[in-house]
Amino acid sequence: MTTVLDVQRFKDEGRRFAMLTAYDYLSAQILDEAGIPILLVGDSLGMVMLGYPTTLPVTMDEMIHHAKAVSRGSRQALLVGDMPFMSYHASVEQAITSAGRFLQEGGMHAVKLEGGGRIVEITMRLTAMGIPVMGHLGLTPQFVHQMGGFKVQGKSESQAARILADAKELEQAGAFSLVLEGVPNAVATRVTRAVHIPTIGIGAGPGTDGQVLVLHDMLGMTSGKPPKFVKRYANLAQEIGKAAQQYAQEVGSGAFPGPEHSYSANGVAPVSKETQVKEPREEVKYGAG
Ligand code: KIV
């Protein structure tokens, strides 16, 4: 199983690594078997899976529901639970309770928190309790209203210096890795060189130690034009739409189900559509596994 020590080793050995989001049992199983070393149950699931306009409405209970499914599907990956908005903002005690739920109920191995500043103390307390913390700096979606939208951060020298200082403080506090989102390449490279812990970029160029993408973006399942930093490795929305249309068309024409998809009673071949009668119940297993 991948541990936080392995992730540090990736950086020490100069091995670039991938992280992907996972929100459910089946995709966790596929990604785990594909050898993706880190799976993030991101609060982006609020937008991707639940249809919220931002990540802000996602609750801790919703995150735990998805975390449980992901942990049931995964065997090898390091699982990181993304602390949702208002699950660590009220106090350090609230942060400890929420992070503890991710490990105890959700089956996660680590948590991720957005921001610098006061997150530093929370990071220190959580790591002291054996809860590994992944930091998240730059474009932090939970700050969408403060940032005035989803905007690239760190463009000015003062902003870049702030991000660098936050990264160093989080490292000092015990964070085992840092997500750098929506920052210029040069800023991400500078931070990556300045800290010993691995950085994981999204919209941060090639200079980070690892990369992360939202699974549904890279599979081409999300609608609309993807952000510039997304590479689509498949076009599943189109494939799913085509398959659904073909299925509906075959149901309409009677081409589905054919004899190969029908059960016969006591060796009697399936009857034609006109005379087909309901067969006695057989045990039917859903899903191929
Ligand atoms: O919620 C999420 O998916 C994330 C990644 C984009 C890093 O935070």
Image: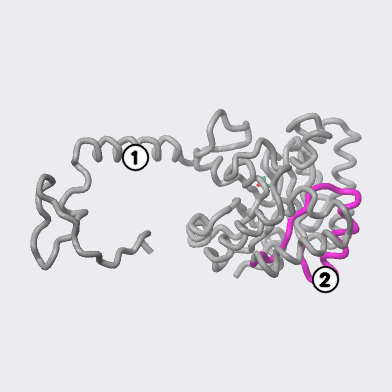
Q: Which span of residues is magenta-colored? A: 107-132
Q: Toward which corner of the image does residue 261 lie, by quadrant? A: bottom left
Dot 2 amino acid type: Met
Q: Which mark is residue 129?
A: 2
Q: Secondary structure at mark 1?
A: helix
Residue at point 70%, 63% (across, down):
102
Q: Position of residue 186 (x, y in %)?
A: 77, 37
Report which residue position mark 1 lands on.
243
Query: Which residue does the image show at 64% across and 45% down from the upper left?
Result: 46
Location of residue 282 (image quadrant) = bottom left
Q: Residue at x 76, y 30 (%)?
A: 149
Q: Quadrant of residue 255?
A: top left
Please determine whether, in this image, residue 209 is positioned above or below residue 131. above
Vertical arrangement, residue 230 with respect to residue 170, above or below? above
Q: Is residue 117 left or right of residue 8?
A: right
Indicate whether 57 appears above or below 284: above
Direction from residue 15 to residue 275 in the image, left or right: left
For label 1, being within 8 Å of ligand 1 is answered no
How has the structure been colored for display?
A: one colour
Label 2 residue SS:
loop
Amino acid tagged 1: Ala
Nearest the eye: 268 or 211: 268
Name which residue lies at 64% across and 39% down: 52
Q: Nearer the viewer, residue 124 or 44?
A: 44
Q: Position of residue 143 (x, y in %)?
A: 80, 39
Residue 47 magenta-drawn? no
